[in-house]
Image (cartoon, coloured by chain):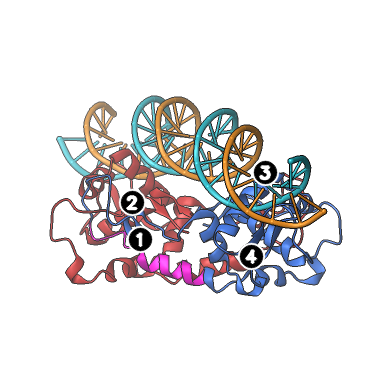
Chain colours: A red, B blue, C orange, D cyan
Amino acid sequence: MLRLSRLTDYAVVALTRLGQAEAVETSQVVAAAIGIPEPTVAKVLKALAGRGLVASHRGAHGGYRLARALESISIADVILAIDGPIALTSCVDGGGNCSTQARCPIAGRWDPVNDAIRNALTAISIADMTATVPPAFRIPAGPAPRSLANEVA
Amino acid sequence: MLRLSRLTDYAVVALTRLGQAEAVETSQVVAAAIGIPEPTVAKVLKALAGRGLVASHRGAHGGYRLARALESISIADVILAIDGPIALTSCVDGGGNCSTQARCPIAGRWDPVNDAIRNALTAISIADMTATVPPAFRIPAGPAPRSLANEVA
DNA sequence: TTTAATTAGGACTGGAGTAGTCCTGTTTGG
DNA sequence: CCAAACAGGACTACTCCAGTCCTAATTAAA
């Protein structure tokens, strides 16, 4: 089902949280705020920092903050940071190192599919994802259904 | 990385093969033609038949043939047949049965993402996937690199 | 200068889900 | 009536991800 990594969902939640923060926040604070175990949040934030989506500050009183506005961060960026490059087939990005030796009947050209998905994902920002929720459906407070495991298709 | 099921790739290859066939072909023949183990091909064809993408004929001299032209079969159709419905989050299609009780900070609205991907995948037909390969890059004959494991993102 | 806080980075492990196989039943042409 | 072929489901081995932990490296404050 074209599963999307669950960590990617965490990343979106964490980014949204940082978007609401006023100063740098430690991974512990973020974890507590969004209700996800700290080690996992730390892992996600590290990955996001590595891709420059969040800025990190080490040492005492360190933490994370957004490197750019949520409006200018696309889901494609997040997926890239968490799961790696967007490419359907190993054939495409792997450079043709097909393990099996079966015949390739011309078929299986996933490039257009990759491009289409990449474009679709690049067009949507994290801000878009939160903005599209009609106010009536927003959860007032307290525990609430949360976005979880992800599967496309 | 938004992994796409490998069976989906097989399905595309098998469909392309059936597109070249002149009469019904058994799963054995298809398997031999595309160089993939017969049981696996059989499994894929069954799934495609279940979704009406290929027509099956039982009994002696039975087999499979395309139910419609490759031009009118989208990858979304294939993914749906092999991997199930296209939806990024269990939150969305599962009806809100979130297992964890963590707080949902409004974030994680994957609906627009799902829609975008669905649209992108629906717009591409199997015929498109084979047609986009420039003639110069077509493999003349014999063993050749084959599309394999699939990952998006 | 020392100490504590905090990120960076990688290794490790358990579990979930998929690929692939196989078996049994049903249909159908010869 | 028999053999060929699909239908459908059960089962297993394996891969890969989620989650945890440990050890640096960095930095503010005392």
Q: Element under label 3?
A: helix
The residue beneath circle 3 is B39
The residue singled out by tag 2 in the image is: A148
Identify the subunit bearing mark 1. A
Whether residue A66 is visible to the viewer of this picture, yes or no, is no
| Disc 3 residue type (three-letter) | Pro
10 Å neighbourhood of mark 2: few (<14), some, or many (≥20)?
many
Gap between marks 4 and 1, in whole Å?
31 Å
> Which is more N-terminal, label 2 or label 1?
1
Q: Are marks 1 and 2 in contact (CB under 8 Å)?
A: no
Identify residue type, mark 4: Asp
Eye-nearest disc, 4 or 1: 4
Residue B116 inside the magenta-drawn segment: yes
Crowd rating for badge 3 (residues with CA inside 10 Å; few <14, some 14–19, many 20+): few
Are discs 2 and 3 located on one and the same chain?
Answer: no
Q: CA–CA distance between discs 1 and 2?
A: 25 Å
In depth, the one of C21 and B118 nearer the eye is C21
Q: CA distance from mark 4 to mark 2?
A: 29 Å
Residue D23: x %, y % from top left: 41, 26
Q: Quadrant of residue A89?
A: bottom right
Q: Position of residue A117 (x, y in %)?
A: 52, 66
Q: Secondary structure at mark 1?
A: loop
Look at the numbered discs 2 and 3 and tell me whether their residues touch, using CB distance below 8 Å: no
Instruction: Mark 4 vs mark 2: tell me if same chain.
Output: yes
